[in-house]
Amino acid sequence: MQVVVGGGIVGLSVAWRLARAGRPVTVVDPAPASGASHAAAGMLAPVSEVTYTEEPLLRLGMASLRRWPSFAADLIADAGLPTTGLTPVTPAEGGPAPRAGRAPTDGGGLDFRSDGTLDVAFGADDLAALDELATFMEKLGLPVERLTGRECRRLEPMLAPSVRGGLLAPGDAWVDPRRVTAALLVALERRGVPLVRARVTELIREGGAVTGVRLAPPGHDVPAQPPPGHGVPTEIPGGRDVPGEIRAERVVLAAGAWSAELAEVPVRPVKGQIMRLRSPQPLLGRCVRGTVHGASVYLVPRGDGELVVGATQEELGFDRRVTAGGVYELLRDARELVPGVTELEVAEMVAGLRPGTPDNVPLIGPSATPGLHLATGHHRGGVLLAPLTAAMLQGEESELAQLCSPLRYRDIS
Ligand code: GLY
């Protein structure tokens, strides 16, 4: 039996893949799908998020992006979501033109869409930085297209006239993480996977090995209400009475930013605030990222018209407060790129904690402690890397798994 500690997108994906392979597994989380996955915008954008020093992350991201279409299709089937009947949506007046041969849709049950990311520059300094990045991307052989400001506005008419130029990454995609975690919970229930709504207080260690988990008493630390937001079930399926401990051959630690409370792992919380805006019609046809005098912002459209604007990056420990400064920063930069955002209704502000590692590469696979496997430290890439992580924990992708091996840090136990 395996126990997965953590019911975010990574833990649930790992458990689902194990269950699909016929392996007995239990998930433990006091409030599944309420952490970083609940706040995430869901960009699956390894190309447009590439940075100069993080080529390993690019390789991981590209490999996981390739897995996303079949991951989404299998999940839709397993969760019993409709595979057809994508709801056509009408672009806002002056909004993006329908793409040739295909009506804009809500992307199906998971709102999974692969229409690319448009990375735009606001100031002359931003354009110079984007040009340099484009040269780097071209050297890496990444499929990107340089665009003038006018070409950017042709693709996305709601962009500000002051946008000076951009870069299209046509292969990037995005998904609604809340729909994904809700579907994973249903799929797990349909496969009979127990979900224990309790907090793990410690890993059981015997003879130098991890042999299970100890749980907080029933009702302790369990929120009265699941988190708000569409797609999150009000009754978590598959719940059962909480015993004091669960024994397991293998414990998979997938507790995100909280992983360091249970094991010696170099994971720290990196706060991200995002804003969800509501619009009757989509304002954008694809993800738009941009830099405004060096500050990054992204806007992710949902099929139902919602627009997610993110995200701050703050090193403040376990602080999950939404702040006036966070709201200001996001709106200030988003408005420079897409002035129409100020007309939209604010649906929600939410803060999540990304699990950061010293090298920004996740910790996936066996640790030096027998019985303890890790699936944590995904920092900005938990949604993108969930399918790859689940595959790695099944022994697939051994070459890429080397990059993520927890054994690169000596002190993990
Ligand atoms: N992946 C985007 C973020 O973490 O803000």
Image (cartoon, rainbow, N blue to C red):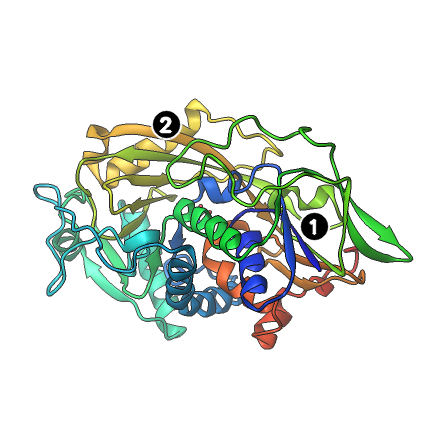
Q: Quadrant of the N terminus?
A: bottom right
Q: Earlier in the sequence, mark 1 or mark 2?
A: 1
Name the quadrant containing residue 310. Answer: top left
Asked whether, in this view, residue 117 is left or right of residue 159, the answer is right
Report the residue that reaches farthest toward the left: 93
The answer to whether residue 134 is left or right of residue 326 is: left
Residue underneath mark 2: 328
Relative horizontal placement of residue 175, taking residue 89 as reference (left or right): right
Number of numbered discs: 2
Residue at x-position 67% and y-position 57%? 374
**What amino acid is at disc 1?**
Pro
Between 242 and 294, the one nearer to me in the picture: 242
Q: Residue at x 38, y 56 (%)?
A: 80
In the rendered image, the vertical position of residue 210 relative to residue 242, given as above or below: below
* CA separation in Å, label 1 and label 2: 31 Å
Res 343 label: none
Q: Is residue 381 visible?
A: no
Q: Secondary structure at mark 2?
A: helix
Please state which of residues 111 and 195 is positioned toward the viewer in this rendering: 195
Q: Is residue 50 above or below residue 310?
A: below
Tell me residue 330's x, y (percent): 36, 34
